[in-house]
Amino acid sequence: MYKFKQSGDTYVVSINNHQEVATALTAFCAEQGIRAGEIHGLGAVCEATLRFLDPVTKQYVDKTFREQMEVSNLVGNISEKDGKVYLHLHATLCRADYSVVGGHLLSAVLNGAFELVVRKFDLKLGRRFDAETGLNLYDFPG
């Protein structure tokens, strides 16, 4: 599903072609015991589902793009929710006509290469649902 090299708290990760990016990245973090950290990367995908939260309705709106696109930027963070790895990812995707779409990355199917840097934080970082915003926010107990 992926290959990686480690240097201290930093991992350089290459996801195998045709994998679903969020699934592979979640598996990587779980298998390496990464429960808090940051992610950045780039690559190419042939399908991606982006979402955004409508702050009025507190409902997510998803849109799937089925075309070859360059991932010019993927950023995110790693935390834990309900005892499992929780990824919060955003992506900027470049289309063949050089237009760009972006947002919260729900899923993406790799088509080409996907290269990431993952940095592990030495702390516990949880999430809790916030009814006011409709989001899973960092949980910093008092």
Image (cartoon, rainbow, N blue to C red):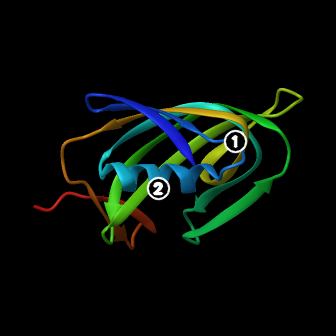
Please tell me how crowded label 1 is: few (under 14), some (14-19), or many (20+) other residues with Cα within 10 Å.
some
Q: Quadrant of residue 106?
A: bottom right
Residue type (three-letter) at the residue carrying disc 2 = Ala
- The residue located at (54%, 51%) in the rendering is 24
Q: Is residue 130 left or right of residue 95?
A: left
Q: Residue furthest left?
A: 142
Q: Is residue 112 above or below residue 26?
A: above
| Local SS, label 2 | helix
Instruction: Locate residue 7: give its quadrant.
Output: top left
Residue at point 10% right, 61% down? 142
Q: Residue furthest right?
A: 97
Q: Disc 1 marks which amino acid? A: Asn
Q: Position of residue 34 (x, y in %)?
A: 32, 49
Q: Residue at x 58, y 61 (%)?
A: 53
Check the image and report above or below for 137 versus 95. below
Q: Is residue 54 above or below residue 76?
A: below
CA neighbours of label 2 inside 10 A, class few (<14), some (14 to 19), many (20+) = some
- Decide which of 31, 83 is in the foreground and name it: 31
**What is the secondary structure assignment of the residue under circle 1?**
loop
- The residue closer to the viewer here, 113 or 50, is 113
* Residue 27: mark: 2
State the image coordinates of residue 76 (x, y, percent, origin top left).
46, 42
Give the x, y percent position of residue 119: 34, 35
In contact (CB < 8 Å): disc 2 and disc 1: no
Image spot of residue 89 (x, y percent):
52, 47
Q: Which mark is residue 17?
A: 1
